[in-house]
């Protein structure tokens, strides 16, 4: 294209100087047509130049389309941050984006993000959102969200009531352009009726502070939200939860997918800064247990994690002469709790719900033996998950925690064996690179208009 336009340009310049125009074996010499010829060739010259620019733009656009691209919106703890980084290592265009105040009350749960659009000035904040939305339209082929009711880039488009019947303009606009939409569930109430959870878990809801708070959890609101994300999304990442209500179906990928951890950040040989070291008497054993937002999640004897049972079990063991103590942690920034977790002989996550969460993932990645109640039950017709069937977590509920802790604490060899298996499991299912590989496979299927799983 460049050589053709160059030859034409030279011929046009020759005509402008009063010369002749050679076209193959012929020579144009009729001067009465020179002006028309020059006009036509000038137009052709411009057309060729524009064509070259358009070709380059199309080539660039083709490169952009060929490159895998995703933007993760809102803070999914630290998971999106590490997953985006791992995808970039695989050659992706990937970003984790936050719209929260980086100094806000939830900042202690996060490890940062690639881009924060927040501004205390509301006009600047809105401008940041609008500018980045325009960039998303031309740059990314996939947008993954987190947070019940927050399936939008704009706070003005968040759901405000329990009907979840607002359709955000940005999502509809992205979908019209063929951009795929994903969502990572945040818990048991995310698209699942409270009554469904109660039946599956044999009454775990009776231990939860939200059971009788319809503003947080109720059948109508939970299912309305699930119906909405099933309608709008191409992918729902349920992260190992049971296949209940809207956390099931053709759009749902059920094994761990976006719950990504950095295996170097949570490493079994993590050096411990002096200010985080526990004072430990000779032979003393430590049980670690933590609850984020403890004051909100533990009231009037209700505590879904089973904290009271953990306290009672350790107190009973101490009364029997075992040299053990409980380290209970709350309100500590997540980036720092790993220094406490790594010193524990046993970590206890939750004792009621039946599937594992962030504390268990971190404990396993650190290679620590971790206790967590695991309910492997699935509804009839639903497949069992490999990540649940092979999980090395030591299962215990509130009734059995004393006996489970006693056995673990008395057997150092068993703790070591479980710790090694836990690290291996964490690397397979929750290391950022492993999650990135699975995400890439699912992404390729979805952009090819296939279901997330066969």
Image (cartoon, grey):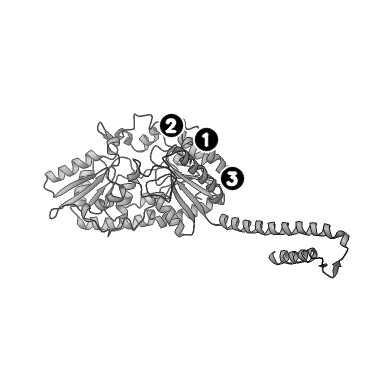
In terms of depth relative to the viewer, which is nearer, 449 or 215?
215
In the image, which is nearer the foreground, mark 2 or mark 1? 1
Q: Which mark is residue 167?
A: 1
Marks 3 and 2 close (CB-CB < 8 Å): no
Residue located at (34% from left, 38% from top): 201
Q: Which residue is mark 2?
A: 221
Q: Position of residue 172 (x, y in %)?
A: 55, 39
Q: Is residue 45 visible?
A: yes
Mark 2, secondary structure of its residue? helix
Quarter occupied by the N terminus: bottom right
When asked about the image quadrant of residue 44, the answer is bottom right
When asked about the image quadrant of residue 436, the answer is bottom left
| Position above or below: 169 against 37 | above
Q: Position of residue 415 (x, y in %)?
A: 23, 55
Task: Specify which label sits upstream in the sequence, 2 or 1.
Answer: 1
Q: Within 10 angstroms of label 2, few (less than 14), some, or many (20 or more) residues?
A: many
Q: Residue furthest bottom?
A: 25
Q: Is residue 316 rendered to the left or right of residue 339?
A: left
Residue located at (52% from left, 37% from top): 168
Q: Which residue is mark 3?
A: 177
Between marks 2 and 1, how big is the CA–CA gap? 16 Å
Between marks 3 and 2, how big is the CA–CA gap? 30 Å
Q: Position of residue 139 (x, y in %)?
A: 54, 51
Q: Is residue 356 visible?
A: no
Task: Specify which label sits upstream in the sequence, 3 or 2.
Answer: 3
Q: Position of residue 207 (x, y in %)?
A: 29, 35
Between marks 1 and 3, how big is the CA–CA gap? 16 Å
| Position above or below: 7 against 39 | below
Q: Within 10 angstroms of label 3, few (less than 14), some, or many (20 or more) residues?
A: few
Q: Within 10 angstroms of label 1, few (less than 14), some, or many (20 or more) residues?
A: some
């Amino acid at each position: 294209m460049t050589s053709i336009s160059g030859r034409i340009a030279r011929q046009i310049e020759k005509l402008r100087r009063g010369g002749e125009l050679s076209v193959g074996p012929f020579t144009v010499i009729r001067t009465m047509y020179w002006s028309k010829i020059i006009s036509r060739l000038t137009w052709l010259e411009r057309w060729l130049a524009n064509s070259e620019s358009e070709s380059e733009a199309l080539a660039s656009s083709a490169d952009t389309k060929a490159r895998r691209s995703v933007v993760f919106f809102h803070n999914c703890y630290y998971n999106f941050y590490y997953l985006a980084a791992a995808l970039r290592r695989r050659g992706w265009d990937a970003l984790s984006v936050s719209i929260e105040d980086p100094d806000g009350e939830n900042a202690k749960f996060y490890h940062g993000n690639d881009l924060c659009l927040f501004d205390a000035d509301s006009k600047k904040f809105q401008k940041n959102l609008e500018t980045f939305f325009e960039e998303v339209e031309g740059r990314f082929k996939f947008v993954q969200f987190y947070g019940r009711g927050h399936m939008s880039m704009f706070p003005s488009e968040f759901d405000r009531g329990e009907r979840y019947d607002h359709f955000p303009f940005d999502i509809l606009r992205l979908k019209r352009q063929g951009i795929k939409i994903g969502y990572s569930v945040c818990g048991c109430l995310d698209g699942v009726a409270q009554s469904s959870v109660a039946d599956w878990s044999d009454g775990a809801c009776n231990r939860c502070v939200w059971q009788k708070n319809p503003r947080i959890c109720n059948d109508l609101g939970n299912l309305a939200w699930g119906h909405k994300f099933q309608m709008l999304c191409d992918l729902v990442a349920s992260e190992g939860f049971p296949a209940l209500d809207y956390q099931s179906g053709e759009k749902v990928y059920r094994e761990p997918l976006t719950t990504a951890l950095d295996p170097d950040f949570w490493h079994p040989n993590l050096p411990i800064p002096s200010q985080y070291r526990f004072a430990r008497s000779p032979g003393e054993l430590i049980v670690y247990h933590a609850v984020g937002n403890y004051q909100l999640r533990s009231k009037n004897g209700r505590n879904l994690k089973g904290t009271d049972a953990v306290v009672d079990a350790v107190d009973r063991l101490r009364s029997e002469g075992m040299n053990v103590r409980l380290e209970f942690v709350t309100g500590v920034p997540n980036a720092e709790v790993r220094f406490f977790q790594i010193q524990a002989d046993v970590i206890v996550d939750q004792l009621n719900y039946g599937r594992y969460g962030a504390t268990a993932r971190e404990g396993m990645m650190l290679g620590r033996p971790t206790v967590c109640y695991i309910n492997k039950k699935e509804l009839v017709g639903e497949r069992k998950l490999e990540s649940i069937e092979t999980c090395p977590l030591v299962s215990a509920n509130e009734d059995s925690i004393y006996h489970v802790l006693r056995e673990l604490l008395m057997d150092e060899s068993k703790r070591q064996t479980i710790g090694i298996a836990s690290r291996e499991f964490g690397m397979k299912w929750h290391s950022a690179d492993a999650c990135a590989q699975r995400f890439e496979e699912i992404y390729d299927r979805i952009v090819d208009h296939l279901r997330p799983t066969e």
